Amino acid sequence: EDLRMVRGVCSPKVIAPLVSHIASGTVLSDSDVARQMSHALAEVPDALLSLLTLLPEKEQIKLLSGTLKDLLNVNIEESDERFKPGHNRRTSDAIKTWVGRGILIFFSAALLTEMERIYPKDCPMEKGPDDKPTPAPLPIMVPGAQQVKITCVKKKAMTIDILVSKESPEASTDPNNEENFVIPTKNLPFSVQVPFETEFSVISSGRAWCCFDKTMSRGENREEFKMRIEPQFMFGAVRRVALEDFFAGGHFRKLVETLLPAPTDDPNSVRGVPLGVIQAINWVYNVIAFELECTIKELRPDPIKALNPHNCPVHHLLRVVRTVVYRTVASRPHEADYEPMKLQMVAAESTIYTFSRAMAFRDAMLGGAKWKHLPLLLDMMKKRLEPQWVSTMSKVLAAIINRKPEDMKSPFQALLLYLDIAMSRRTMETSDYKVITPVVSVYADLLEAGWTPTYEETQARPKHGVPSLRDPANEGAR
């Protein structure tokens, strides 16, 4: 086939100026007509990039990475700030968000091809009417998806229809909600198509919930159903080998470094970056975590070889998670960012836990032999002393030093692991004190917040001159 036209319209020289022009027009469109025109024009870059999948993988990567890099270095046509305050900054933010959105959709199209979710196995737990734990609605999230096909393939003790809602978990239990999608359970399999709005520099969460009217069900809490999720993306189908080339060529690392510049005075923070970019990068790492989870469970016969700490920097992941934690703690229910940050927190929590359990990333998560990232991990932990988050971070701290996360009964147990390892060295160095100090600080913060160590944790004491609790001379010390 003659693909010269595809190569021409997908080239950075065409798409980069187009996206820059659209970004400039969408941030401050005053009239309804202008907004409608901008909305229609905003779909053009997506349509052009969707043609990339017609090309060989190496050409896809070359054109896509070239376009995204050119956009991050484009010279914005400056406006007079006296007449359009903030126009230049908003245009720049819109371009960066669109770049982050493009990376997310490309990764999602390659890795989130088809999934299965089971009720109640994959559901979070909530309090029922009698205060007993009961499964919450089954959550589905496919970041960047234009549409998701949800098929019920199996059911048990289901006497009523399954309801699918894009609105909220509560809406998926309301049979009177006209916005719900209905899946009859009499004749299976049965599918519904759930579309999501796509806008320029606005990232679709691809979020939905599946449940049923629990008050009318006669299943007596034995209800089960299995859903097959088939997402559809702007790029259509992207082969995994394309991601192999994207990682191996260093494109992911360079793009993330450009989108998340590190301040010289505090390399662990993220400043001056639009929320859309933070959301996009957080979700990208969450999609990568899905791939790592499949690798851990040995569900991938051909794991991506180039997916390693060099090509997928862990430090940027930790910076993004730290930013999400700080923003979540600072947000309030009446603010516009409150619900989006709660959603980002859920993604960040599962991402950091999965990365900590992936063998290839454990050492990088800890920061090498000097535990360079331990103070950063502890800072995240103490900033949000919420039971679920503290439990997750305790498991993370255990996993990255090759301890079983499920054995962590309390955060104090996880913290004492590091004190024990550091104090087992007969001669402690300055670098050891730099990491022990924040460990002790978090221990004190937990005590101050009302957390209580277990009896064993409060009784174990080292003898004089024997710093390690595991030293034979310390046996029986109290």
Image: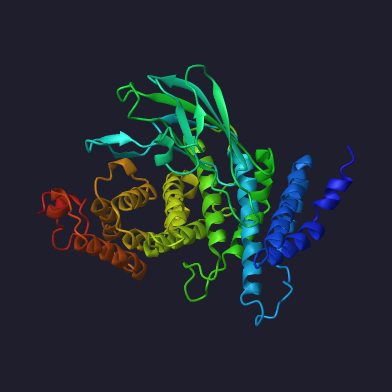
Answer with left or right where residue 429 lies relative to residue 163. Answer: left
Residue 199 shows in this picture: yes
Q: Residue furthest bottom?
A: 82
Residue closest to the eye, 101 or 295: 101
Residue 70 shows in this picture: no
Residue closest to the eye, 444 or 6: 6
Residue drawn at the location 62% of the way across and 43% of the way down: 146
In the image, residue 47 lies at what x, y percent?
A: 75, 47
Residue drawn at the location 22% of the way across and 35% of the way down: 130
Q: Quadrant of the N terminus?
A: top right
Quarter holding residue 462: bottom left
In the image, residue 114 lies at what x, y percent?
A: 57, 33
Residue drawn at the location 70% of the way across and 56% of the way down: 36
Q: Residue furthest top?
A: 187
In the image, residue 381 lies at what x, y percent?
A: 34, 58
Answer with left or right where residue 60 lies relative to residue 265. Answer: right
Residue 84 sits above or below residue 188 on the image: below
Residue 392 sits above or below residue 220 on the image: below
In the image, residue 92 lies at what x, y percent?
A: 65, 68
